[in-house]
Image (tube, helix red, strand yellow):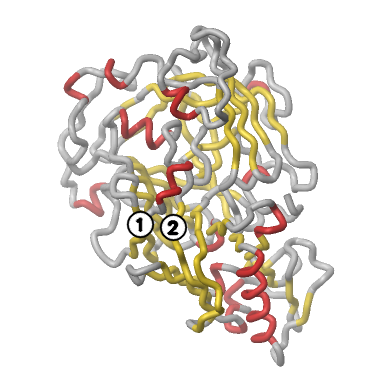
Amino acid sequence: MDGHGVSRKGMITAVYWVLLCAAALQGSVADIPRFWKKSVSRVGSSFVLPLSGNVYPLGYYSVSLSIGHPAKAFDLDIDTGSDLTWVQCDAPCKGCTKPLDSLYKPNNNLMHCENPLCAAINTSGNQPCKTPSDQCDYEVEYADQGSSLGVLVNDYFSLKLLNGSLVSPQLAFGCGYDQHFPVKTPPPPPTAGVLGLGNGKASIISQLSNLSVIRNVLGHCLSARGGGFLFFGDDLVPSSKIAWVSLSASSSDKHYAAGPAELLYNDKPTGVKGLKVVFDSGSSYTYLNSKAYQAVLNQVRADLKGKPLKDAVEDKSLPICWKGAKPFKSVHEVKNHFKPLQLNFGKGNAQLQLLPEAYLIVTEHGNACLGILNGGEVRLGELNLIGDISMQDKMVVYDNEKKQIGWVTADCDRLPNADRDYNGDFSEPYAADFGILR
């Protein structure tokens, strides 16, 4: 952790270690009635959720989900860099930041080692369960040394699909009763936990897909003005203009990784190639490996020579900041002093364009700061993270069905509306018997 408020909960989530005794649904997919074992293909087998938050000053985007019966709302950080969802839990709780009445309360719904999902997501190689009937303990540790310790549970998630259907499938998640936040960070955000959206089998998106509720596709649209939306299923995926790249074979490690990519500055080669790029909504800022970071910093500084910007070393918001003749009020006042960055991916000619507003913030002091950080300083090694700052005002789609990730410029302030955007082309609401809202 570098002490600059780099990501959710002060946690960088693209690289992490999950130690799990066991975790699985109470009852397997085979227990679902046959009429649910069908192809999810008709329009409306998706759902959309509004987001709250921003890159600066909050440093996170969150979504409200209703869990339990009766349902209770929990605000969770959205995180495509990890797959385990967890909620602060009254079991009792150590290190929790939420008041007691806002914690999740387990109710005879602990999960046991005998459930089949546990073996698939136990990445430690250890099997601490002594008997199949033991409870499923988990520990997730993030790259900045933040962590959550708890037990796996399953409960109802209340969801409304675009076609009007109300469903509440039982999903597995962590009941976190011991949270640790790094000391050298701002106070943790007022969220109740993490919504793990990685492509591992423990991920909420994977579980929903295995239950045939939706296709294994998700996406987000993060507004630079705050808020945005998150969607599950493929109904909102644009049919054209979206740039697609294949997920790397190593994406099986629960990350959405693409590459190799070449780094350009103002459409000119920097000499940096072969970058492995991870798309991580759990990180506020973008991280490049040491070589790529230094290349960007050198180019930016050379380009600023002769311009009316000076180093603002007194501003500790981020490592590199600049000040003008008077305080800046927004990125739009300073962006013309900077050039765009590009990441070119492989043979498909897909390009991720990072305009200055996709790598700059303006702080409360009125200075412009570089929202690209050195990943080598936070144990990321050769990994490169595309964080929220560089995904703002883009629809980013994680398609686990076709093993690809895509992006397109979008209006993230406009929450999709089923009738408006699809001309009301939905079938009548229907019901599944594994958890109807009543």
The residue furthest right is 314
Name the residue at the bottom extreme.
306
Amino acid under disc 1 = Ser
Query: Residue 284 at what x, y percent from top left?
Result: 60, 54
Residue 409 location (% of width, % of height): 39, 66
Q: Above or below — where is 32 with respect to 348?
A: above
| Residue positioned 79% across, 62% down in the render | 316
Residue extending farthest front:
125
Label 1 sits on a secondary structure element that is: strand
Mark identifier at residue 226: none
Please give the name of the residue rendered at 42% of the width and 51% of the height, measured from the top-left corner. Answer: 220
* Label 2 secondary element: strand
Residue 378, image x and y in percent? Answer: 70, 53
Label 2 and label 1: CA atoms lie apart by 6 Å
In the picture, residue 36 is in which quadrant? Answer: top left
Q: Which mark is residue 258?
A: 2
Tag 2 near tag 1, CB within 8 Å: yes
58, 214: nearer the viewer: 214
Question: Identity of the amino acid at label 2?
Answer: Ala
Q: Residue at x 32, y 34 (%)?
A: 209
Q: Is residue 434 left or right of residue 298?
A: left
Dot 1 corresponds to which residue? 246
Q: Quadrant of residue 129?
A: top right
Residue 369: quarter of image:
bottom right
Query: Which image quarter is the C terminus in?
Result: top left
Considering only order in the chain, which callout, 1 or 2, is on the residue closer to the N terminus?
1
